[in-house]
Structure formats: structure tokens, C-alpha cells
Image: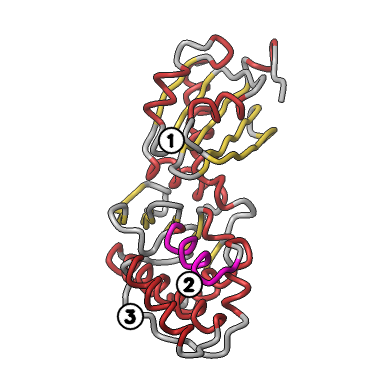
Amino acid sequence: MDIRGEMAGTSTAGIDIGSRSIELVVMRGDEVVHAAKAPTTFDPVGQCRALLGDVCAARVVATGYGRKLFVEAFDKQPALGRVTDITEIQAYALGASHLFPQARTILDIGGQDSKVITLSPQGRVLRFEMNDRCAAGTGKFLEIMALSLQVPLEDFGAFAMSGDTRIPINSMCTVFAESEATSLMARGEKAQNIALGIHLAIMQRIHSMLRRAGQDGPLVFAGGVARNPCAVELLRELTGAQCLVPQDPDLAGALGACLLARKLLENDND
């Protein structure tokens, strides 16, 4: 993407550097003009540089695990103007409430953590719950279990939905759950039913987080796991809430960062 000259002065960018993927959103005024994604890999700075390409922006806001690393690496880049950072909680609140102004709760299930954020009617963060010390209830857990059942991760949700029996998964420790799934397979249980049980165990754990956070009103489901149809269906069933899924759920954090960059640029120009 190439944003140069006068257009660069009206452009802002938000970048979300997560543990497993990086998302970029570029806006010109109120319009999103570019979005891109890439795996984080072992070289997040190099991946950020490749994602940015020829992007020029007057303000850039970074979020995610690698936000401080991004600021350190890109703060002196003339094409990017001023660079700052915000927490994932703030970024997801801004992004989700922009997409769904009626939202009162946000659920983000990412590769390495899961977050629940409750919002005021004005979109202000009231409280949040976060799981970042255990793989259970994260995309990593699903990835490991899909690998154990030899199902491609992108097909795992649909595969689970083809099950006809919900087999209880008693352990949410990744190692023990994988062993339990292997034992169930050896007993002759259908892989689809095991996959369904795995999804149910994860979403029940997430439901507990939602209750602790005081989930209320319309619920926005963001993050990469929101692309999983079984996770979405079970979330709706367990919560009984209106569950809103963005068209690109993993871009919500980058969008929120970009919206803050736009606000900062407006303040700069006042």
C-alpha cells in the first residue's frame, strides 16, 4: 500500500502485535483504506516492517504483546510520524464499541490468552477478566487439540459441529486433555464427538469468565477464535446473549488502535 504526500498527513494506522499474529489497519479520515495480517513468527519487528510496506501515516498506535517493541523500533521512522501505544483492553474496547455501539461486553479469545471486558453505555471500560497464564480457553489449546485429532485448525469448528454426542472432557490442562482425547479415541469414540466435547469444555470455562466479569447486554466476540463456528454457537447457547461477531474479528484490536491514532491526530491539528 502506498499513502504519500498530502494523503499521509490525513492517514492513521493501528497495529496489533500479538503472540501468534500481527494485524494492521490504516484509515484516511473515517474510512478504513487498508487492512493486513501476518504471523508473528520469531521476528515480529521484521513482520511489522513487511506489513507496513510503503504505508505513511501521521499517527500510529500499537497494541498487543509487542507494542513496546514496536514503539522502540519504529518511533524514529519519518514515514510513520508519531508512534505511541495502548493496552489490548483499551484497543478492543475502542474497536468493538465502534463496530457495535450497543456492545456492553467484549470477549477476545486469542492465541495465547482470553479477555472479557465490560463497558458502560458510553463505551468506557468498567472492568475486565484475563486469562494469560494457562493455555486452556485459548486458541493455542484448540490448535493443540486439533493437531491431536489430526484435523486442520481452520476446519476444527465445523468438524466438531458434525458430532452428535457431547463427550465430557474432564481435564483442561493441555497435556492431560490431549492424553484424555487419545484415550477416548482408543475406546472407539468418534473424533467429531471428542472435538465437540473439547469445544464445550473451553466455552464453559469462558462462560465462567464472563459471569465473573459481570457480562451484560449485547456481547461482541472478537479475536481469531471468533472465526470458529462451533465456538460461536456454544457461546450463544451458554450465555443466552445476543452474540455479535465482526466481519474480521481478529482486526478489532488494530482497529481500536487506529481509532485512537485518528483522535490523537485530530487533537494535534486543533
Q: In this figure, what is the number of numbered marks?
A: 3
Amino acid identity at mark 3: Asn
What is the x, y in percent for residue 135?
A: 35, 59
Amino acid identity at mark 1: Thr
Q: Is residue 158 above or below residue 103?
A: below
Residue at 37% in and 72% down: 177
**Mark 2: secondary structure:** helix
Residue identified by numbered label 2:
235
**Mark 3: secondary structure:** loop
Alpha carbon distance from label 1 to label 2: 26 Å
| Neighbours of disc 2 within 10 Å: few (<14), some (14-19), many (20+) | many
**Mark 1: secondary structure:** strand
Sequence-first tag of 1 and 2: 1
Region rendered in magenta = 140-151
What is the x, y in percent for residue 23?
A: 56, 39
Name the one closer to the observer, 122 or 202. Answer: 202
Sequence-first tag of 3 and 2: 3
Residue identified by numbered label 1:
63
Residue at 45% in and 41% down: 18
Amino acid identity at mark 2: Leu
What is the x, y in percent for residue 122?
A: 42, 49
Residue 149 magenta-highlighted: yes
Q: Is residue 92 above or below residue 263?
A: below
Residue at 58% in and 62% down: 153
Residue identified by numbered label 3:
170
Contact, mark 3 vs mark 2 (Cβ under 8 Å): no
Left or right, 87 with respect to 36, comes to: left
* Image quarter (top left, top right, bottom left or bottom right) of the N terminus: top right
What is the basis of the colouring in this image? secondary structure
Q: Residue furthest front?
A: 186
| Neighbours of disc 1 within 10 Å: few (<14), some (14-19), many (20+) | many
